[in-house]
Amino acid sequence: MRVLVTGGSGHIGSAVVPDLLSAGHEVVGLARSEAAATTLKALGAEARRGDLDDLDGLRAAASDADGVIHLAFKHDVMYAGDYAAAIEADLAALEAFGEALAGTGKPFVGTSGTVMAAVAGRAGTEDDTLPPGPGLQARAACENLAVGLAARGIRSSVVRLPLTTHSALDRGGFIPTLVATARTTGVSGYLGDGTNRWPAVHTLDAARLYRLALEQAPAGSRLHAVADEGVPFRLIAETIGRRLGVPAAVIPDDEAAAHFGFLAPVVGADNPATSAHTRALLGWRPAHPDLIADLGLDHYFSES
Ligand SMILES: NC(=O)c1ccc[n+]([C@@H]2O[C@H](COP(=O)([O-])OP(=O)(O)OC[C@H]3O[C@@H](n4cnc5c(N)ncnc54)[C@H](OP(=O)(O)O)[C@@H]3O)[C@@H](O)[C@H]2O)c1
């Protein structure tokens, strides 16, 4: 298949692109800069200049492809504090892809998060959904739009990523942010009793799931890229603390924002999630180190 990948120059995309190529697909990566184009070419992909805001360009790129994997997201806008604008841009991009692919039966794989399956009292499944809500849950609108493309004759699916996708490719995600915070403050913090759980997946396992979704997922599938169903946050904090030689300690709730910054609302999230349905549907099996084993390696802790 000739596959258009958005976000191919990013953390997860830089694993998705080689995985697609090694399975015999051709990859065209959307590049918003010369630097992104260079990264994509180094990975072995063709680079096509474009931007999430250039909707005509997105439509043309999707029309020229046999399938689309959509990973790009305006994290720069999100981290600058305007999550609503990043969501709006994603909704517009999804509409553009929908217009280009309608009636073709081509695969479209979108991106969401397991927070859209956060239910009280048990692990969330692929069948759990939430309406758009506060914080990260706002992205449910994007998930619903992407899955709904199935009704327009597109073999659409969505991969829900856990709260952390981890590996040596992860330079700016939640784990590097926690490591940097612990290093700066001298404390590896957690909230409350730290029993809240984060699901996790290795980047290379997530990449494999994107390819399987492209190749096989039935229209309208929600898929969970979950390897660790729920790692107690305190264990994450203690492991980071041990690696850095700083104590793990509870951060009082009224100091959470000052200590954790933009991550404060996510640190306390309890989001156990399963991937049993995804594994049965696509034969996906995580094969790479789990989160705690990965934190035992050096890549998150070397200062170079
Ligand atoms: N990492 C996680 O643990 C996690 C968890 C849940 C959900 N997700 C979602 O998974 C997806 C991939 O995440 P990631 O960690 O790989 O993110 P990332 O490393 O920040 O990469 C983001 C990608 O999007 C591209 N991009 C950003 N703004 C763009 C624009 N205006 N036009 C075109 N391309 C643009 C970036 O291009 P440049 O190279 O030019 O910057 C980059 O290729 C995102 O949708 C993210 O929200 C990730």
Image (spheres, grey):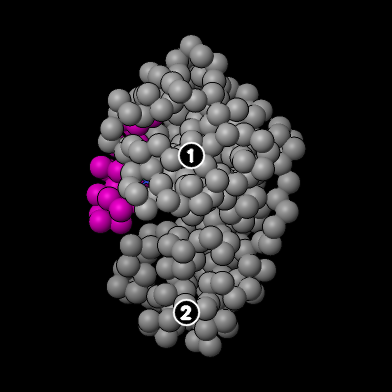
Return the residue at label 2. 303
Q: Residues within 10 Å of mark 2 (few under 14, many from 20)?
A: few
Q: State whether residue 137 is above or below residue 24.
A: below
- Relative side of 84 to 70, left or right: left
Query: CB of residue at label 2: within 8 Å of ligand 1?
Result: no
The residue type indicated by label 1 comes to Glu
Residue at 47% in and 77% down: 304
Residue at 61% in and 40% down: 20
Mark closest to the chain's N terminus, 2 or 1: 1
Percent position (x, y) of residue 208?
64, 44
The residue type indicated by label 2 comes to Glu
Percent position (x, y) of residue 153?
51, 14
Q: Is residue 21 visible?
A: yes
Q: Is residue 122 visible?
A: no
Please name whichever residue, 189 or 282, is drawn nearer the observer in this view of the structure: 282
Q: State whether residue 15 is above or below residue 178.
A: above
Residue at 63% in and 44% down: 19
Q: Residues within 10 Å of mark 1 (few under 14, many from 20)?
A: some
Please name whichever residue, 177 or 102, is drawn nearer the observer in this view of the structure: 102
For the residues marked 2 and 1, what is the alpha-carbon distance in whole angstroms?
Answer: 32 Å
Q: State whether residue 250 is above or below residue 227.
A: below
Percent position (x, y) of residue 57?
33, 29
- Asked if disc 2 and disc 1 are in contact, CB closer than 8 Å, the reply is no
Return the residue at label 1. 46
Q: Nearer the viewer, mark 2 or mark 1?
A: 1
Q: Which residue is outermost to the top?
A: 103
Q: Which residues are magenta?
A: 71-94
- Relative side of 44 to 29, left or right: right
Q: Would you identify the image quadrant in which residue 97 lies? A: top left
Characterize the magenta stretch by its predominant secondary structure. helix
